[in-house]
């Protein structure tokens, strides 16, 4: 699906925009392609954009002082990714975002998002709805970490996102679940 149509379908689930309003909204995005393994955001970067995934799969992750990777998010088509702390608070990135597969994304700068939200109420509504959904998902994931064993979390992940099994290696799924690859293999 073409990038413009993918974003239009995604937005239409929540916000009603005329064709002219959508074209104006879409004009604020820049299309970019990345190769598998390429970084979109690296720790220490200045972050000024968020990324809507058109095709491919990204991961957002943190590497601690012991060089252990913690994956915060897999971003598949119609998902958004960035280092939101760095984006909103104008700090340097602590979260990395890279490509698990070749990817096509639409970049929206923070300034352009704020501008378009002030111009079009429906776009502001969409971003508020998306932020709320993201917050709820983060709470659910945190509660699952606190209340469920690894086997349950693994099965829950694959039930919610079956395409991850074929797209993402077990070492990355283990990092997302907060366990070693060996622990995941025993499941």
Image (cartoon, rainbow, N blue to C red):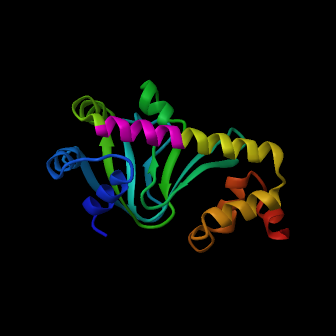
Q: Nearer the viewer, residue 133 or 165?
A: 133
Which image quadrant for residue 123? top left
Q: Residue extending furthest front?
A: 16
Q: Is residue 131 magenta?
A: yes
Q: Is residue 182 left or right of residue 114?
A: right
Residue at x 67% of width, y 66% of height: 158
Q: Position of residue 132 (x, y in %)?
A: 51, 38
Image quadrant for the N terminus? bottom left
Image quadrant for the C terminus? bottom right
Q: Position of residue 126 (x, y in %)?
A: 37, 41
Q: Is residue 18 left or right of residue 183?
A: left
Q: Nearer the viewer, residue 59 or 41?
A: 59
Q: Which contiguous range is marked in magenta?
A: 122-133
Q: Position of residue 139 (x, y in %)?
A: 66, 40
Q: Is residue 29 left or right of residue 72?
A: left
> Can you see residue 67?
no
Residue at x 25% of width, y 47% of height: 29
Q: Is residue 181 above or below residue 41?
A: below
Residue at x 79% of width, y 64% of height: 184
């Amino acid at each position: 699906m073409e990038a413009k149509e993918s974003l239009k379908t995604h937005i239409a689930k929540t916000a009603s925009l005329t064709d002219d309003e959508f074209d104006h909204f879409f004009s604020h995005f820049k299309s970019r392609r990345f190769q598998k393994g390429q970084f979109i955001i690296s720790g220490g970067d200045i972050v000024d954009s968020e990324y809507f995934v058109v095709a491919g799969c990204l991961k957002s992750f943190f590497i601690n002082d012991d060089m252990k990777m913690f994956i915060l998010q897999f971003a598949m088509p119609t998902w958004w990714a960035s280092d939101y702390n760095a984006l909103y608070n104008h700090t340097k990135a602590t979260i990395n975002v890279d490509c698990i597969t070749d990817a096509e994304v639409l970049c929206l700068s923070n300034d352009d998002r704020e501008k378009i939200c002030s111009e079009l109420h429906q776009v502001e509504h969409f971003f508020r709805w998306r932020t709320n959904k993201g917050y709820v998902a983060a709470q659910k994931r945190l509660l699952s970490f606190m209340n469920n064993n690894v086997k349950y979390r693994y099965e829950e992940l694959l039930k919610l996102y079956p395409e991850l099994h074929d797209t993402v290696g077990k070492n990355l799924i283990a990092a997302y679940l907060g366990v070693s690859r060996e622990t995941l293999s025993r499941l």
